[in-house]
Amino acid sequence: MIQLKSLLTCIDNSGASIVECVNVLKKKRPATIGESPQTRVMGEEPNGEWRQSNSLGNRLGDRIVVVVQKSKPAGSEAPTSSALANKVRRGDIRHAVVVRVKKELQRPDGSVVRFGDNACVLVNKSGDPVGTRMNGLVGQELRKRQYSKILSLAPMHV
Amino acid sequence: MAALPAMRQLGCLRSLMRTPKFSPMHLSSRFISTVYSKKPEPIPFPQNLPQQFRSQIPIRLQPEQAPKKMKVYPPPPSSRAVCKDPVAHVAQSQMAVLDPNGERKALFDYRRNPRSVKPGDIVRVTFKNGDPFNGVVLSIRLRGVDTSVLLRNELTRVPVEMSVKTFSPNVQSVEIIQRSQRKTRRARLYYMRFVLELLGSPPENLLQFRALY
């Protein structure tokens, strides 16, 4: 349930630590990492696989626009170690993908997952993550979208 | 004023000849019937009436005008006699498919089975399509086929809670890793969410914490 003014932790090494949501993209509802249960129509295929209707699109890993509110202290300001330097600074406006939400979200098999915080990963306009590392687990819902890069960088998915 | 016409002879006569008229007030009092009068029996249509006299009988009383007999269908047979409690029947049939030998049911029936999973235990749930999930049992929601168990763990310093439907075909196995150290006094251990916050720096994962606790 990420909406305007929601504060999220940024779990990548792009340099941002706390970001604030300023817009939710392609959606009129608060952003989350799972599809809202109201829009989901479920059923079981003959082969035992769960299927979901794509009539309203899979709302997995919603994209949001954020403002960096707090950046991590830069390790070294030397111009040579550009990889270590913060890629974003306080006040920057970036796109982000929600990877964890506090609001409980229901999976198609009926299980419910609730994370302890709201977290996101900064991405560029094309959807590639800005950072190169990630600390912290991400939701499995990202698997359904093209965020395989975020999933492979994350140490764990639940 | 009523006595006035009686004084004059002519006036008195006239009043006697006058047909009785009902004033509206009078009428209203007349409507209150105190005696029950039966509805008159309908006069049957005269038998053997010659055809030429038929026209003298008003049309509404002619036998053709009699109200048609409505066809009354008997109600469909009630399925209640067949199955008195369909919800229980469906639940039972689902249980027969999802848990044929009753093992899973016994594993979570913490009110009756002393060997079952209990709140405070650490369990590992293995899924058919994903990674297993370990966690402390915060609560067991016994609801027949919809029975679910709420697990909590801390993974990479992020608390994660997962409510798993125990009879889900996606759940391959549930194993008890560790029994709770001491008997919990509550059935729902939601306070575990806040105990960690009070500690300040949470341990690496909740499993260790629970073992200490």
Image (cartoon, rainbow, N blue to C red):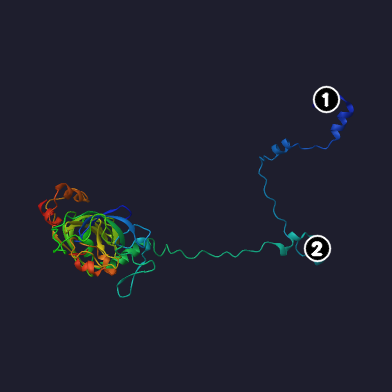
Label 2 resides on the chain identified as: B
Residue B109, disc:
none
- Could you tell whether B11 is left or right of B190 in the image? right
| Residue furthest left as drawn | B212
Mark 1 Cα shell of 10 Å, populated few (<14), some (14-19), many (≥20): few
Q: Are marks 2 and 1 on the same chain?
A: yes
- Residue A141 spot, x, y in % from top left: 27, 65
- Tell me: residue B191, above or below residue B91: above
Q: So how many labels did they put on this image? A: 2
- Tell me: residue B30, above or below residue B180: above
- Residue A94 spot, x, y in % from top left: 28, 60
- The residue singled out by tag 2 in the image is B55
Secondary structure of residue under mark 1: helix
- Residue B61 spot, x, y in % from top left: 74, 59
- Could you tell whether A81 is left or right of A61 in the image? left
Secondary structure of residue under mark 2: helix
- Residue B38 spot, x, y in % from top left: 67, 48
- The residue singled out by tag 1 in the image is B4
* Residue A65 found in image quarter: bottom left
Mark 2 Cα shell of 10 Å, populated few (<14), some (14-19), many (≥20): few
Q: In the image, what residue occupies the spot 16% across and 46% down?
A: B198
Question: Gap between marks 2 and 1, in whole Å?
Answer: 56 Å
Viewer-side residue, B58 vs B100: B100
Amino acid tagged 1: Leu
* Residue B178 found in image quarter: bottom left
Viewer-side residue, B124 vs A114: A114
Label 1 resides on the chain identified as: B
Viewer-side residue, B31 vs A130: A130
Q: Classify the position of the N terminus of chain B by image quarter.
A: top right
Q: In the image, what residue occupies the spot 15% across and 55% down?
A: B206
For residue B158, say whether it is visible. yes
